[in-house]
């Protein structure tokens, strides 16, 4: 019920903002309308992530259906990303194993900035989708996707490209750029908020740490941000117990918070740590935010 209500509201908001964008196309009102639509659209990534864990719905087929829908919206091919993400949870920020390290050292500040519009990450995902659609197995596929899933991944990638091609052809046929504002492109122009949230997860923290309290953060967010981010601001709890559904993470946090480093009090608080850390890491790859003393104190209590 939690997932049906949440996803129902999310899809309804996409419909409303998309319709407002249609009505206002050709005027300046289209800018805020499509900014809202794109921000909601890019939020598919947080939803696809959780649906890939199979936790939002109790019914397996509902998780599967909505996982594939949101994965397409997020421009992350479903089969490939599910297996890639499992490695991330097994080897979080282990430099030789984790394929989802968002900020590698030395920190590339230009890349981080460009990905507020998904320029680097989006290009990489589209490139993988295209190669996989052609039957070319990238190194990641060979490393962590079971061969039994390769055929499904190839056909899924082809379906992604086919839908995007149809949208492009429709835009050409209609003589309007408007169709492109609804599919794929919003993941780029609306990606700013997901990047803002995503960096709070691990950026600047310890590599090669087996204790998730050393490499993962929880950040308190306002209700709107928490809705957009699908409760993934409780990211430390999510890494400790990845099979706990999104709607239960606030309750889990309340149970565990005395055993965890203090949660950050919003974006200003967390970025007061992240921004200086990334600036130093861009010049000194050995630097990181060291929580060892905090965790040791928790263990001694």
Image (cartoon, rainbow, N blue to C red):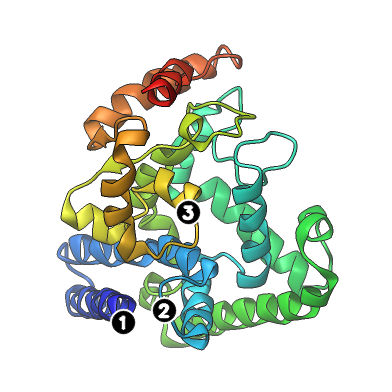
Q: Is residue 177 left or right of residue 89?
A: left
Q: Which residue is mark 1?
A: 4
In primary-sequence order, the first of circles 3 and 1 is 1
Q: Which residue is mark 3?
A: 241
Secondary structure of the residue carrying tag 1 is helix
In primary-sequence order, the first of circles 2 and 3 is 2
Q: Is residue 82 left or right of residue 31?
A: right
Residue drawn at x 46%, y 23% is 278
User: Visible in this render: residue 133?
Assistant: yes
Q: Outermost residue toward the front?
A: 301
In primary-sequence order, the first of circles 1 and 2 is 1
Q: Are marks 3 and 1 in contact (CB under 8 Å)?
A: no
Q: Which residue is mark 2?
A: 57
Residue 232 vs residue 45, the one in the foreground: 232
Give the number of the disc on residue 164. none
Above/below status of 233 relative to 68: above
* Mark 2 residue crowding within 10 angstroms, few (<14) / some (14–19) / many (20+): some
Residue 36 vs residue 68, the one in the foreground: 68
Q: Are marks 1 and 2 in contact (CB under 8 Å)?
A: yes
Residue drawn at x 39%, y 73% is 177
């Amino acid at each position: 019920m939690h997932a049906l209500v949440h996803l129902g509201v999310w899809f309804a908001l996409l419909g409303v903002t998309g319709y407002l964008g249609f009505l206002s196309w050709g005027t300046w009102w289209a800018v805020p309308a499509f900014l809202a639509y794109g921000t909601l659209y890019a939020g598919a990534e947080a939803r696809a992530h959780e649906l890939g864990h199979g936790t939002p719905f109790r019914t397996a087929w509902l998780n599967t259906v909505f996982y594939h829908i949101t994965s397409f919206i997020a421009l992350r091919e479903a089969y490939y990303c599910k297996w890639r993400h499992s490695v991330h949870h097994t080897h979080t920020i282990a430099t030789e194993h984790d394929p989802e390290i968002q900020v590698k050292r030395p920190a590339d500040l230009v890349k981080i900035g460009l990905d507020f519009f998904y320029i680097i990450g989006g290009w990489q995902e589209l490139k993988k989708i295209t190669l996989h659609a052609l039957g070319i197995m990238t190194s990641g596929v060979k490393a962590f996707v079971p061969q039994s899933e390769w055929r499904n991944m190839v056909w899924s990638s082809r379906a992604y490209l086919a839908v995007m091609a149809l949208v492009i052809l429709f835009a050409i046929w209609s003589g309007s750029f408007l169709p492109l504002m609804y599919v794929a492109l919003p993941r780029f122009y609306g990606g700013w908020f997901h990047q803002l949230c995503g960096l709070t997860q691990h950026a600047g923290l310890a590599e090669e740490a087996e204790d998730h309290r050393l490499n993962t953060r929880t950040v308190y967010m306002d209700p709107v941000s928490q809705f957009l981010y699908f409760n993934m601001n409780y990211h430390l709890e999510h890494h400790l117990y990845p099979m706990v559904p999104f709607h239960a993470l606030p309750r889990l946090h309340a149970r565990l918070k005395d055993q965890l480093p203090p949660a950050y009090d919003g974006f200003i608080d967390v970025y007061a740590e992240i921004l200086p850390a990334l600036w130093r890491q861009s010049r000194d790859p050995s630097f990181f935010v060291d929580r060892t003393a905090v965790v040791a104190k928790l263990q001694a209590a």
